[in-house]
């Protein structure tokens, strides 16, 4: 029970890390760059993807077609105010975001950011392991499980931790490769 719970939490940590990686620019247009952009739509923050169709017609352009034409200006404003770092150009019916090629300094900065996200994911996994080990030890103290069972569960938990940590490392290596590829 404890292991299954820890496994699902670790899986969600890996998925969270993957989502964080998706928000990092790689030099290619990717609609997920705009996932964190919230538009003030009638007084409530609304995700951009629920107000517009976001597509990537080529490797260096993101095209945003609002479902309602009157939202064009507020979408443009929201993108300008966001931390995406791209300047929107509005032609009256669609918004275009041109993705400039990354400089080597910017690439290094993004690699550092990816490394930071990966470390946050690893820390989350280690915290899950710590909590699970505490639960196992409590069960052992309460004589619900034997010392051998406790040791086996802790060993299995460590294997699980290593597995999910290596998944994050693999995701990081892939993201670094994406960022550094010119």
Image (cartoon, grey):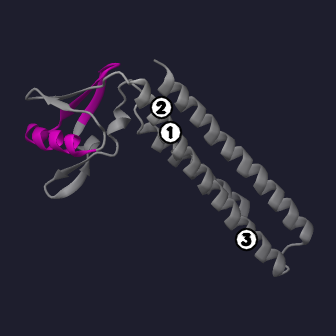
| Extent of the magenta region | 53-82
Q: Is residue 12 in the magenta section? A: no
Q: Along the line of sight, which residue is nearer the eye, 159 or 116?
A: 116
Q: Along the line of sight, which residue is nearer the eye, 45 or 166?
A: 166
Query: From this viewpoint, is residue 1 visible?
Result: no
- Does residue 5 appear left or right of residue 54 in this picture? right
CB of mark 2 within 8 Å of CB of mark 1? yes
Location of residue 74 with respect to 25 vertically, above or below: below
| Inter-mark Cα distance, 3 to 1 | 33 Å
- Determine the secondary structure under disc 2: helix
Residue highlighted by disc 2: 108
Q: Position of residue 46 (x, y in %)?
A: 24, 51
- Does residue 171 appear left or right of residue 164 in this picture? left
Point 45% across, 17% down: residue: 182
Residue 137, picture quadrant: bottom right
Point 30% across, 25% down: residue: 99
Residue 5, picture quadrant: bottom right
- What is the quadrant of the N terminus in the image? bottom right
Location of residue 105 with respect to 22 vertically, above or below: above
- Determine the secondary structure under disc 1: helix
| Inter-mark Cα distance, 2 to 3 | 39 Å
Location of residue 110 with respect to 164 vertically, above or below: above
Residue highlighted by disc 3: 134
Q: Earlier in the sequence, mark 2 or mark 3?
A: 2
Residue 65, picture quadrant: top left
Point 51% across, 41% down: residue: 18
Q: Crowdedness of circle 1 by 10 Å Cα count: few (<14), some, many (20+)?
A: few
Q: Along the line of sight, which residue is nearer the eye, 51 or 172?
A: 172
Q: Most extreme residue toward the bottom, as rendered?
A: 142
Residue highlighted by disc 1: 112
Query: From this viewpoint, is residue 101 visible?
Result: yes
Viewer-nearest of labels 3 and 1? 1
């Amino acid at each position: 029970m404890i292991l299954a719970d820890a496994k699902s939490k670790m899986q969600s940590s890996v998925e969270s890390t993957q989502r964080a990686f998706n928000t990092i620019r790689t030099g290619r247009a990717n609609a997920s760059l705009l996932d964190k952009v919230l538009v003030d739509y009638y007084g409530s923050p609304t995700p951009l993807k629920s107000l517009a169709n976001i597509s990537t017609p080529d490797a260096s352009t993101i095209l945003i077609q609002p479902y309602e034409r009157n939202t064009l200006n507020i979408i443009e404003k929201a993108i300008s105010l966001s931390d995406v770092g791209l300047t929107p150009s509005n032609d009256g019916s669609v918004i275009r975001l041109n993705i400039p090629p990354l400089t080597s300094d910017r690439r290094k900065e993004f690699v550092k950011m990816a490394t930071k996200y990966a470390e946050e994911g690893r820390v989350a996994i280690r915290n899950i392991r710590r909590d699970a080990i505490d639960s196992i030890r409590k069960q052992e103290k309460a004589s619900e499980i034997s010392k051998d069972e406790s040791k086996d569960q802790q060993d299995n938990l460590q294997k699980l931790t290593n597995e999910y940590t290596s998944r994050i490392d693999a995701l990081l290596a892939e993201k670094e490769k994406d960022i550094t590829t010119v």
